[in-house]
Image (tube, rainbow, N blue to C red):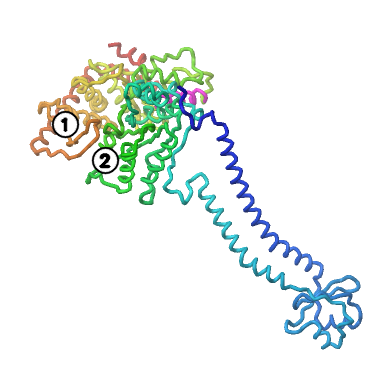
Amino acid sequence: MKPSNIFGQDKPDEKTKKKGQKQVQVKLRVNLWTVLAAIVIIFFVIPGLIAGVQSFGSSTTESVTQVMTDIKAGSVQKIDVEGSKLVVTYKDNSVKNSTKEDTESFTEMLKNYGIDPANVDYNIVDQSATAIIGNIAGIVLPVLLMVGFFYYLLRAQNKGAQDIFSFGRSKAKVFAKGKQDVTFADVAGVDDAKKELEELVDFLKNPLKYRKIGARTPKGALLVGPSGVGKTLLAKAVAGEAGVPFFSMAGSEFMEMLVGVGASRARDLFAQAKAAAPSIIFIDEIDAIGRQRGRGGMMGGHDEREQTLNQILVEMDGFTPNDNVIVIAATNRGDLLDPALLRPGRFDRRIVLDMPDKEGRLAILHIHAKGKKFAKGVNWNQVADRTIGFSGADLENMLNEAAIGAAREGHGEISMVDLEESSTKVKLGPAKKRIQSEEDKKITAYHEAGHAIVTHFLKNMDPVHQISIVARGMSLGHTLIPPVGDRTHETKSRLLEQITAMLGGRAAEDVVFNEMTSGASNDIAQATKIARAMVVEFGMSDIGPINFGPDMGLGDFGQMEWYEQAQNSPAFMEKIDTATKKFLDDGYKAAVKLIKEKKKLLDKVSKALLEKETLDRDDFEKIVGKN
């Protein structure tokens, strides 16, 4: 069955209608400004020009006495009387101006000078009409100009923004079929989530197939996952595949400085979607309005946000049936959402998106590699292994940085070297050429070599991938140890060896220089974090399997329903600190022991680092051997 398509290509006259509406608006604006311009020209420009012409042609001014003398002498051809102004035209075609008293008429003035008015060719100009028009223009024109000025300001202010009288209207963007280029074929690495959303799209396209066996439309789907895993991309794919109107809006767009606007926008959004049903609503970053209500303290409260959330709850599952509108929402803070949002009947499907595994990364790399030129020697399996822990957005950025780097160096194709550099850049930041003394370089080289040596000779650690003393970000050097494969669990043995490897740099400084530097501060912080988690959260210490962390009441979906700071007794706090310190002390002792045993290899690796600055796995294993 062909899906209903309100905004699709089946109705080409819709574009024509919108185009016509825009043309009418343009014509109205043009007409308005044309009228205002005409008024200004008629009442100000033309009279000014006339006055200028007249004044240009009659720049000479004569006294009244001289004009009367000239009349008696017969040298005046005619006189135009304009109020108190006399425009005197002489028989030689010259024009002169003169001014009489306002209280005296022209005929009386002639008689006073002994001149018969019947012998003078004069014309009294009636200025009453001009005066009336001028007075009207003086009142109306400023008003019209002010109206036009404020109209222009409002148009400029609202250009690309919301009209000043429509705060309560939804700001949702509407996507029609054929307007959104992204489809499910452009999404990879989240196959389970894609399958769930494909079913929602199929339900809208073929509702009878599901209703025949009594299935109802799912009310909503909530996408939860870290940033960059493809939540918004999936929503765009739904817009491209659905063939129904798709309304997209960010959670923050509901909020405004005016109270009640958020709830009004929610009502308007659902009203639009219901009018266009079957349709889909997508709310990005729903945690901006969907946070848990009514919890004081850390969670706080916000009346406007809670009103907006209440309205959305009612719209999704209230008394009014809402069968043909599906709501999709995305968030990376699912633990903060209100439990009422997550119950069945609202967001029936809660879809968790994780970082992609190796197969997912390969699929993502192949999608984003389209349109880019790669060398024949590119090993995509190796790239996928190298990028464990990368999100889809990280992978896309890595390939783009590789292309930029290859173009900057003048390469015709993207090589493995370009990909290696771009992956390191995405993870650690761009390389920095800091000016360092020979002593600082030597300390950095031994520090990074210490990490590498300790890691290499520990049984449960992954192979060293790269060692470098090139500064990146906030670090002076780095030792990359990417996992060999994706892991779900971490064992106690491996966590203890991670602590030992992290303290290998400090151990090398201590053994070689008999000194300690501040360069190990981040290593110590990370090692302490792991050791404390082993005691407080994982129950891996001699204290036993007890959780000493904050008490967080979690709902079915992991959302935090309450929070209470851990109330540990002083005796237990002392035991926690003692157990944490024991893990760190044991790790440091193991690191120092390894450094002393492999001191010759440490010196060789440090020397190679000072010469080359960066060693890859093959260079490193040529020195220390393979495990």
41 above or below 238? below
Is residue 70 rendered to the left or right of residue 554?
Answer: right
Q: Amino acid at mark 1?
A: Val
The residue labelled by disc 1 is 536
Q: Does the segment drawn in magenta span residue 401? A: yes
Q: Which residues are magenta?
A: 392-407
For the point 38% across and 20% down, the residue is 361
- Above or below: residue 27 compared with residue 521: below
Quarter of the view holding residue 527: top left
Q: Nearer the viewer, mark 2 or mark 1?
A: 2
Q: Amino acid at mark 2?
A: Gln
Which numbered disc covers residue 1? none
In this orientation, which residue lies closer to the viewer: 175 or 326?
326
- The secondary element bearing badge 1 is classed as helix
Q: Residue at x 40, y 18 (%)?
A: 363
Q: Is residue 423 visible?
A: no
Q: Mark 2 and mark 1: span between their CA atoms?
A: 27 Å
Find residue 292 and name its label.
2
* Left or right for 77, reference 212: right
Q: Position of residue 364 (x, y in %)?
A: 41, 21
